[in-house]
Image (tube, grey):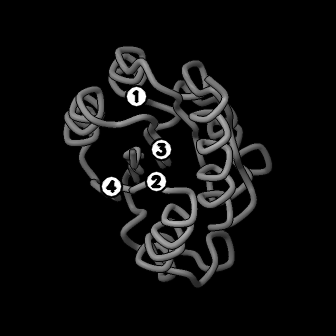
Amino acid sequence: MTKLITVLNGPNLNLLGKRQPEIYGHDTLDDVEQQCTALAGEFDLQVRFQQSNHEGQLVDWIHDAREDSGGIIINPGAYSHTSIAILDALNTFEGAVLEVHVSNIHQRESFRHHSYVSQRANGVIAGFGIEGYTLALRRMHTLLNAG
């Protein structure tokens, strides 16, 4: 049986590859989705890849994932540091949650060093560029097959 993994991307990630390439690189979110989809196929997983600049939309997608997903991989962007609503929604999800950041948030401004999402995440990957997404998907595969 193929398991669904929801991959959520927060604000400004639609500009990946265009916005501050010295920090985030030149790859686009479409590139990330293609890489994740290809790797998911190798693991007999499916990915639902979504991006929104709106906090409430991300909360709604987390609620949707409760119904059909084995895990959530989330790059909440700036909402990592501000959104208790996203944390509360993730706390209602019973599967694994992995947090991804393209940049190393601990080498950036001090306000980026704290993530509310990390309080719920089973793991955090930061600073590996877009490779962080495929690393998270590999880890999700391991977590889903551990039980």
When asked about the image quadrant of residue 24, the answer is: bottom right
- Name the foreground residue: 32 vs 9: 32
- Which mark lies nearer to you, 1 or 4? 4
Which disc number belongs to residue 45? Answer: 2
Residue 47 in the image, given as x and y percentages of width and height:
39, 56
Image disc number at residue 83:
1
Q: Is residue 15 left or right of residue 133?
A: left
Q: Quadrant of the C terminus?
A: top right
Specify which label sits upstream in the sequence, 4 or 3: 4
Image spot of residue 7 (x, y percent): 41, 51
Q: How far is mark 2 from mark 1, CA to CA?
A: 29 Å
Give the class, few, some or many, for how many residues have Cα within 10 Å of label 4's Cα (few <14, many ≥20). Answer: some
User: Mark 4 and mark 3: span between their CA atoms?
Assistant: 12 Å
Residue 89 to residue 104: above or below? above
Q: Secondary structure at mark 4?
A: strand
* Residue type at the position of mark 3: Ile
What amino acid type is highlighted by mark number 4? Arg
Q: CA distance from mark 2 to mark 3?
A: 16 Å
| Name of the residue lying farthest toward the front | 1
Tell me the CA gap for discs 1 and 4: 22 Å
The N terminus lies in which quarter of the figure? top left
Q: Are marks 2 and 3 in contact (CB under 8 Å)?
A: no
Q: Which mark is residue 74?
A: 3
**Mark 4 touching mark 3, by CB under 8 A?**
no
In-image side of 131 versus 69 (left or right):
right
Of callouts 2 and 1, the N-terminal one: 2
Mark number for residue 48? Answer: 4
